[in-house]
Amino acid sequence: MSPVRGTAVTARVGVVLGVAIAVCFLTGLISHFIQHPEPWFPWPTRPVWLYRFTQGAHVISGIAAIPLVIVKLWSVWPKLFERPVIGGPVRQLERLSILVLVGSILFELSTGLLNVAQWYVFKFFFTTSHYAVAYLAAGAVLVHVAVKLPAVRRALGEPIDTVTNGATDGPTRRTVLRGTWLAVAVATVATAGQAVPALRKVSLLAPRSGTGPQGIPVNRSAIAAGVLGSAYAPEYRLIVANGDQVRSFTVAELNALPQTTHRLPIACVEGWSADAEWTGVVLADLLAAVRSPVDRDVRMISLEPPGPYSRTVLPSAHARDRMTLIALRLNGRTLDADHGYPCRLIAPSRPGVLQTKWLSRIEVTQ
Amino acid sequence: MTAMRFVLGLAGIISASWGVALLWHWPLTVLVNMALWALVAVVVHDVVFAPLCVAVGWAARRIVPARWWPSVAVAGLCTGVLVVLAIPVFDKPGARPDNATVLDRDYHAGLLISLALVWLAVPTYVLAVRRLPVRQDDVIEQQRTDDVAGEPPSP
């Protein structure tokens, strides 16, 4: 076996991998609790790019973990064949815990990578399984760190290359470490362009080039949502309701209301994001028209037939924010069908999947 | 350190238990599919990917001159990573006719270009190192002081 394998490499790559997994886990939790709100989790409306940042970091740290996992597993692979192969109960427990650790991390990284490319080849639902197994993976990592902490501290305190190892003609451990950081950089540059505009042109393996109708990518098309007929129907009305206070607006009436333009990012749970100029009616003004109190959450209902994202709830903090728009125009032109014509929600610092498109009804929760 | 290890271990057990609790009432077929997915991932790594890397490394080491070997090994690692990242996009298996904004690059060309750049960097690096007036890298390679190169490039 190669003499450059060893705890010196394992510990150092492990520390960086631990940081990547921690970032990935925490940003993943943030995204989960925005989509499944809890009273103890208030998500701010500023800065407007906050969700864009956390979810970009989620996917970037997950992809950066791939080369780190490859090198870390390489550095310990010979341990797989250490004797005794079966051993006593303690040995078996140790092997089982490593199996849970590696299995759950590979599960998270592989399903995440496939989800970003929308390749649903697995026979289970992505979001719920990715979420549940994340706790398993994070727990296995913590137990692993607890077990290995003395070995990690010892390894970090010792020189990277021993004399015998450094005297070989091959790469030193220092080269392995530098190569690993380089591979992390290569993986990041190859994919991060869907979240980092500066890398857009060089991210040759990113699932999105960052363009689309009106310069913005789409996650759910109007055809997939089955709304093309109802969105362009002459009898279309946007209903705004607060109990028995109900107002109804045609597209022309919405266009006749005072229009506001804001530059806001659209940031998808799949990690891509893009800045755009949105023009429309301030949601708070529409809510004022039905005498809604400012401390109410607001339900957004789409023309899309009932499904997981055809109805979403906008927290009161976002609902009363003057930057939250019912957008009618995107980058200066009428909304494309795929971007939610006739009108859609666009609020600061929210996942794209909750920026409900093809709005038919806005309800103040009672 | 003992107290810290205890806290870490306890936090780990609580987190993992919460994960198991979330999965507890799921249909057995779904759980089996998930476990199989994770198990196949482990097996593919341990008995296909890892031995393949060892074999390629063993063979390459007998062909590649010693001075070239470190950069070739690093390029090999980058190749492996790029290939893994290319798998879900290469033939666009997730593409749908109604949405042209997903998987909208030429990934065959993308993989080819990125691999070409990685492998072009190998001779460039080896030749650049040879032309350096002071063999700075050699000096660093031979250093035996404490590690100061623990930082990854910021992503």
Image (spheres, rainbow, N blue to C red):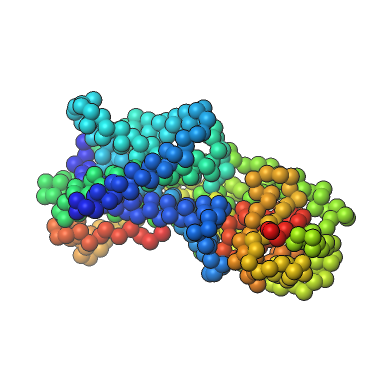
Note whether A243 is above or below B6 in the view shown: below
Q: A271 and B79: which one is in front? A: A271
Residue A349 picture location, percent across and down: 57, 63
Q: A326 and B7: which one is in front? A: B7
Q: Who's the residue at 62% across and 53% down the image?
A: A353
Q: Is residue A329 in sight in this rendering? A: no
Q: Residue furthest top?
A: A86
Residue A275 picture location, percent across and down: 60, 65
What number of labels is visible? 0
Residue B106 horizontal side relative to residue A256, left or right: left
Residue A222 horizontal side relative to residue B42, left or right: right
Residue A350: quadrant of the picture:
bottom right
Q: Who's the residue at 84% across and 67% down the image?
A: A253
Q: Residue furthest left?
A: A163
Residue A310 horizontal side relative to residue A173, left or right: right
Residue A270 horizontal side relative to residue B117, left or right: right
Q: Is residue A50 in sight in this rendering? A: yes
Q: Who's the residue at 26% across and 42% down the image?
A: A75
Q: Who's the residue at 19% across and 47% down the image?
A: A151
Note whether A217 is above or below A49 in the view shown: above
Note whether B60 is above or below B118 in the view shown: above
Q: A51 and A276: which one is in front? A: A51
Residue A55 picture location, percent across and down: 50, 56
